[in-house]
Image: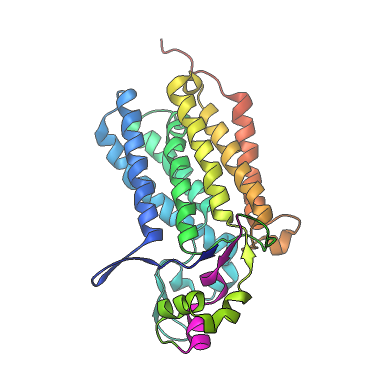
């Protein structure tokens, strides 16, 4: 399979990027799921609005800072303005958007924000909040990885040509500038399409290696994580033990991440210092260990007297 999608949906002067659209879907579904949970728990929906806003901000800010500090600090230590601004300033001013988000950073930020939310807004134990928030978070993770697939980023390692799931990620192999230079076509989308469809550029297409669609593997596994959590909350008494759903989430989601990392291309970061595992795997291990702790130590709260 050859993967060469456009960046988004063009509506006149407006370009809606598929990656951004996946985030919108993730947050929208998350709000809907939490609304059902709040109604079930007889909580005020006014508190849900606060939760939604805080979660969106924590996700985006935490994911950005996670990428900066875990994956690319060597660059950003000398380009600090680019951490929170969607521009490159060297060699010339260029709008880039926020290229670089890390899910581990988002997870840390969400947990911290839920602590303040539990204390100052909903007045429930933090584990009560986390046990419920992880359900829409697992759902959102599915769409974030689909967004990565549309962006042809976080791709897998080269695989055998006989692999029925193998994909040629044209936009991962050729940068927009490379595609334009090699085809002598001034528009990047037209240049990419020429590489894929024009027989005279068949040699360029042949250079694109077949790789694992690691994003889709991960998204597929997250579907099961979401439905397991969803089932445990609605059909069992698991949520009565504070921290149990949270622990199950940490184990399942980050175990998936740890496993898929074996077939992902290196993303750089702290793995260059620590070795043995990838950066994503090193960062996943603490989450899995915390999850195991809550799996065995979760208890039902004492009844109020």
Residue 290 vertical position relative to residue 26 in the rendered view, above or below: above
- What x and y, as percent, mark residue 285? 66, 45
Whether the magenta-drawn stretch holds residue 96 is answered as no
Q: Is the N terminus in the top left, top right, bottom left or bottom right quadrant?
A: bottom right
Q: Is the C terminus in the top left, top right, bottom left or bottom right quadrant?
A: top left
- Tell which of 241 and 204 is nearer to you: 204
Residue 39 vertical position relative to residue 181 in the rendered view, above or below: above
Question: For the point 47% across and 37% down, which residue is it?
Answer: 134
Residue 67 vertical position relative to residue 188 in the rendered view, above or below: above
The answer to whether residue 90 is left or right of residue 283 is left
- Tell which of 146 and 111 is nearer to you: 146
Give the overall secondary structure of the magenta segment. Answer: helix
Q: Hey, which quadrant is residue 185 in on the image?
A: bottom left
- What x and y, as percent, mark residue 298? 57, 24
The answer to whether residue 164 is visible is yes
The answer to whether residue 302 is left or right of residue 289 is left
Q: Residue furthest top?
A: 305
Residue 143 vertical position relative to residue 10 in the rendered view, above or below: above
Q: Which residues lie in the magenta part?
A: 165-184
Question: For the point 75% across and 59% down, which residue is it?
Answer: 275
- What x and y, as percent, mark residue 29? 35, 42
How many badges with numbers are in the image?
Answer: 0
Question: For the point 47% across and 86% down, which residue is it?
Answer: 91
The answer to whether residue 243 is visible is no
- What x and y, as percent, mark residue 125? 44, 28
Whether the magenta-drawn stretch holds residue 173 is answered as yes
Q: Residue furthest bottom?
A: 184
């Amino acid at each position: 399979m050859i993967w060469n999608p456009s960046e988004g949906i063009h509506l006149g002067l407006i370009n809606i990027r598929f990656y951004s659209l996946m985030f919108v879907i993730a947050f929208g579904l998350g709000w809907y799921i939490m609304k059902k949970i709040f109604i079930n728990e007889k909580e005020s929906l006014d508190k849900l609005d606060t939760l939604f806003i805080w979660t969106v901000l924590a996700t985006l800010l935490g994911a950005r800072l996670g990428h900066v500090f875990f994956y690319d600090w060597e660059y950003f230590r000398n380009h600090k303005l680019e951490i929170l601004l969607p521009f490159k300033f060297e060699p010339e001013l260029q709008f880039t958007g926020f290229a670089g988000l890390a899910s581990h950073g988002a997870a840390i930020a969400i947990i911290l924000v839920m602590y303040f939310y539990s204390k100052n807004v909903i007045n429930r134990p933090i584990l009560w909040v986390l046990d419920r928030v992880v359900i829409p978070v697992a759902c959102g993770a599915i769409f974030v990885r689909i967004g990565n697939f549309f962006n042809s980023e976080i791709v897998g390692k080269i695989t055998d040509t006989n692999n029925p799931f193998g994909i040629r990620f044209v936009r991962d192999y050729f940068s927009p500038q490379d595609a334009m230079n090699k085809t002598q076509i001034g528009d990047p989308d037209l240049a990419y399409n020429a590489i894929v469809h024009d027989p005279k550029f068949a040699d360029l297409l042949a250079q694109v290696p077949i790789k694992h669609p690691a994003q889709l593997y991960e998204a597929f596994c997250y579907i099961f994580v979401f439905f397991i959590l969803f089932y445990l909350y609605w059909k069992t008494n698991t949520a009565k033990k504070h921290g149990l759903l949270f622990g199950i989430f940490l184990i399942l989601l980050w175990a998936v991440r740890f496993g898929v990392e074996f077939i992902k291309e290196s993303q750089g970061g702290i793995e260059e210092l620590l070795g043995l595992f990838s950066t994503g795997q090193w960062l996943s291990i603490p989450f899995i260990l915390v999850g195991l702790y809550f799996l065995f130590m979760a208890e039902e709260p004492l009844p109020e007297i």
